[in-house]
Amino acid sequence: MRYDLDRIRSSFPALDEGAAHFDGPGGSQVPRQVAEAVGRTLASAVANRGHLTSAERRAERIVGEARQAVADLLGAEHDGVVFGRSMTALTFDFARTLSRQWRPGDEVVVTRLDHDANIRPWVLAAQAAGATVRWADFDRDTGALPTASVTRLLGGRTRLVAVTGASNLLGTRPDVAAIAAAAHEVGALVHVDGVHLTPHAPVDVAALGADLFSCSPYKFLGPHLGVMAAAPDLLEHLRPDKLLPSSDAVPERFELGTLPYELLAGTTAAIDFLADIAGGSGTRRTRLLEAMALLEAHEAALAVRLEDGLDRLDGVRRLGLAPRRTPTVAFVVAGRRPQDVARHLADAGVNAPASHFYAIEAARYLGLGDDGAVRAGIAPYTDDADIDRLLAAVAETVG
């Protein structure tokens, strides 16, 4: 199998505008096939889901296909896939639902490494229930999250552990499976924020030990919406707020209002695009595992090129040196505000923004304040020329 970068890049119309895109962690560019799937659905007759008219049947089919596509991507069960407006909205919804079972003295564990969408919903829900929030710190020097920093906080009153699959600021990939195993030993549930992990590596929610796993299709070449995957048996025992006439079936009981059919069609198209990266045959799940392994190797090689180049520049300091990371590099330039560096890069046609990127606890813990750092994320369409353009533009800011 070969990673055909030229073929992949030719599928992204946005690249014709000429910018080098390192802004994928905030939302990737979209292949033509995804845009066509969205447009085709909008131009077709659709209706509320049902089985009488062709429009109803089309809507039913689109939803079913999207659930199965996400299940294939994540190694999940299709009837445990819940769609929502965003990962943040879904996490708030599930935090409110789960916390109804919490009592004063119960405990929730969160980490300072996480995006705030995997912190604040749980913190606010714990406060409302009278539960205690326990914070796991990461290593400031390396950006690593030692497993023990989470597991030492666990006890008989731990009800939930929220941990990221990969830091969207530093790229750190904690040992989620070990954390989840320890959490399950004390009877706690585990929610994994997979938003930044899913675009860069093969995912198996069962192997990770995630009871709840959330991700965002717009980070892996798809449209803007959120997904949460869980075991159907778990979902059967959760009772969210819902409208009286809306379905009480799983997973529909967690989906508020009519689903955006065009975005679901685009999500299926994005997952099919990923599956086709490696070519080959077999089930979509098999092809996805092969494709994501191939993509991971491609992106890792580019990350080494980027990191080596940044390390050779005086005054540039990389943040996050954990041994297992996604191809996402955060850095600062001595004497320059991150936003000023990002502005210079933008003027050079390099899209690498600067912020805390909603990982505000991590940014503050690192002493970056709310300015954060410049973040360069490698995507399936990144090539050597993009890396060289970024390094040349950063070099111009040094000194």
Image (cartoon, rainbow, N blue to C red):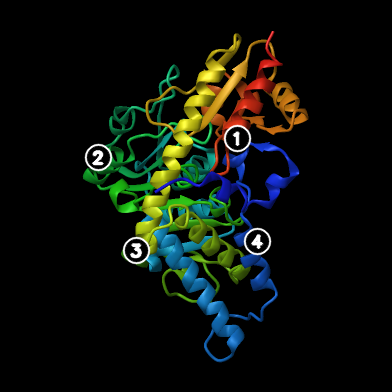
- What's the CA distance linking mark 4 and mark 2? 42 Å
Do callouts 2 and 1 mark residues in contact (Cβ within 8 Å)?
no
- What's the CA distance linking mark 2 and mark 1? 29 Å
* Percent of width and height locating residue 34: 60, 60
* Residue linked to disc 3: 282
- What's the CA distance linking mark 1 and mark 3? 38 Å
* Residue linked to disc 1: 357
Do callouts 1 and 3 mark residues in contact (Cβ within 8 Å)?
no
- The amino acid type, in three-letter code, at marker 3 is Gly
Do callouts 1 and 4 mark residues in contact (Cβ within 8 Å)?
no
Q: Is there any visible trace of residue 49 in the rendered image?
A: no
Q: Is there any visible trace of residue 306 in the rendered image?
A: yes
- The amino acid type, in three-letter code, at marker 4 is Ala
- The amino acid type, in three-letter code, at marker 1 is Phe
- What's the CA distance linking mark 1 and mark 4? 26 Å
* Residue linked to disc 4: 35
